[in-house]
Image: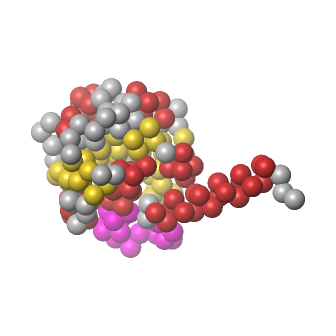
Amino acid sequence: MPGFASITLRYGSRAARLLGLVLGFATWTGFADELAEARTKANYLYNFTKFVEWPTPAAEALHICVVGSEPVVNVLSDLASRDTKGRLLQIWSGVDDPHICQILYVERSVPELPALMREVGGNPVLTVSDAEGFAERGGAIGFYTENGQVKLAVNPATAQKAQLKINAMLMEIARIVR
């Protein structure tokens, strides 16, 4: 009869595979084009709404704000007005006031990235970017590419400062940084 540890390991592995499928975790050997990468990032952003808890819902809508990546905005636009945890999803391209965002994705080439991070620091905003070393430098979730796959780096301290709770299944598929 297997011990508790082996059952936990098997369950954890199964949970990680299931979460990978739910999040649209790419198993491609490489990206054929920018659109494939944008689809993967958009799937992650959408599904973060299901695996992250905000302290209190500020409004009936949940806002994903995207700065600098029209391909990601275009893919996410197909998901706008969907229900996620009882709230409607709204997608914003660019942002005048980043405090309205529950998720703020800033593409790596946007020069205002550091200023946007300072502006939302400490607020319940999940900050996400594909800038190199983003999570290591204080962002909540960083996208990085390894072996042709988009992967996640999560900074739990940043999420905690923003009063966000990241589901353990999401943490299981991510690289944890401090």
Q: Which colour scheme is used?
A: secondary structure
Please identify the quadrant where the N terminus is shown.
bottom right
Q: Where is residue 168 in the image (x, y as percent from the top left)?
A: 54, 45
Which residue extends farthest left?
Answer: 96
Image quarter for residue 78? bottom left
Residue at 44%, 60% (x, y): give it.
23
Residue at 63%, 61% (x, y): give it.
14
The answer to whether residue 65 of the structure is visible from this angle is: no
The answer to whether residue 94 of the structure is visible from this angle is: yes
Image quarter for residue 112? top left
The image shows a total of numbered marks equal to 0
Q: Position of residue 59 (x, y in %)?
A: 20, 41
Residue 123 painted magenta: no
Instruction: Decide if residue 14 is on the left or right side of residue 52.
Output: right
Nearer the observer, 65 or 61: 61
Q: Where is residue 12 in the image (x, y as percent from the top left)?
A: 64, 54
Residue at 57%, 62% (x, y): give it.
17
Q: Classify 58 as above or below 25.
A: above
Which residue extends farthest front?
Answer: 86
Q: Position of residue 107 (x, y in %)?
A: 28, 49
Q: Classify 9 as above or below 31.
A: above
Residue 33 painted magenta: yes
Which residue extends farthest right?
Answer: 1
Nearer the observer, 154 or 134: 154
Instruction: Decide if residue 93 is on the left or right side of residue 40.
Output: left
Instruction: Decide if residue 158 is on the left or right side of residue 85.
Output: right
Residue bounds of the magenta highlight = 26-41
Residue at 49%, 66% (x, y): give it.
21
Image quarter for residue 128? top left
Nearer the observer, 154 or 57: 57
